[in-house]
Amino acid sequence: MKYYIGIDGGGTKTAVVIGKDDGVVLNSIEKTGSSHKHIGIDGVVKLISDSVKEITESIGVSMEDCAGCCMGLPCYSEAPEADAELTKKLEEALSPIPVCIVNDAVVGWAGSLECSEGIHLVAGTGAIAYARTEDGRDARSNGWSEFFSDEGSCYWVGKQTISLFAKEADGRKPKGALYEIVKKEFNLKSDIEFIDIAEQEYTPQREKVASFQFFAEKAALAGDTEARKLYDEAAQHLADTALGIITQLGWENRTVPVSYFGGLFKAGDLILDPLREKLNAMNCTMAPPKRTAVEGALLLGIKTFK
């Protein structure tokens, strides 16, 4: 009986699973991030090869017992030269295991929709959507860069929340719960002290900016109408992201399932209610994810190499 390995890479963590062709996970491990923009191509190769060795040994099998390894990696398919180098080195490092490498959004789709037709919408630190048709056509939308894209992500909401605090402090927006929450959280004696905190502690780190959206959630639940509006705006951006997929694939006249995943959805009804309303207006139905992204990598590996 052959085994399959699925890997879901990310900027901060990497999940690895192993299973047989029934798609049942036999064991799983978690490692640090696997973005070549953060740890370099050689760093990614070492992390992945070490992880594959560890997970095969954990159930007492060898790499020769594996029929294939499918991995979703951040930034893959966005830079041809880096893709080629990464692919070559991973194939060499994991030999004799056949390797399939895709963008991490693809394994998210494979898990959430179990490789069936539909849109997978991600709103974590960044925001992106991916879809694949029954005949193999695919499309992605959003997720270009936090500098000029990623609207509707935790990063986007976090950045807007930082801006909203400044507006409430100035009186450009009515002072709401967010103003008091941030002042108390950072023990501000003067509102202007927040500039140094934002620029030194948050602005340089994408994940830190994304984490600031939790203050928007707390403020919205406490009745801050401006904070609540941020989630309505995020929902519109995410609906537009799905619309990009619909337009590319010619799905305008059919009902499309849209699965969703990512940290922003931990805000619950704040984001889910407006998003559902906007997607329903586009003839889309929200579909909670059936499996995780790393399970999707396993399924896609089975589908590719069986």
Image: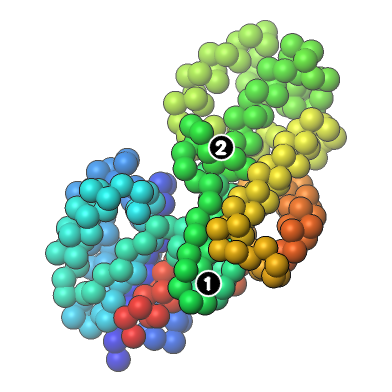
Q: Position of residue 97 (x, y in %)?
A: 21, 74
**What amino acid does circle 1 point to?**
Thr
Label 2: which secondary element: helix
* Circle 1: element type: loop
- Write down the residue under mark 2: 155
Crowdedness of circle 1 by 10 Å Cα count: few (<14), some, many (20+)?
some
- Identify which residue is drawn at 36% across, 49% down: 78
Which circle, 1 or 2, is nearer the viewer? 1
Q: Please name whichever residue, 180 or 88, is drawn nearer the observer in this view of the structure.
A: 88
Q: Where 154 falls versus 239 (above or below)?
A: above
Q: Residue at x 35, y 53 (%)?
A: 76
Q: Quadrant of residue 23?
A: bottom left
Q: Residue at x 32, y 63 (%)?
A: 101
Residue 8 at x, y percent in the picture: 41, 61
- Above or below, 102 against 207 in this view is below
**Residue 43 appears anywhere in the view:** no
Amino acid beneath label 2? Tyr
272 vs 298, left or right, is right
Give the residue drawn at x 30%, y 91%.
1
Left or right: residue 37 versus residue 149 is left
Q: Which mark is residue 52?
A: none
Image height of 192 relative to 218, above or below: above
Q: Which sits in the foreground, 5 or 77?
A: 77
What's the mark number on residue 133? 1
Question: What is the number of callouts on the image?
Answer: 2
Give the Cα separation between the discs numbered 1 and 2.
Answer: 29 Å
Residue 130: % across, % down? 52, 59
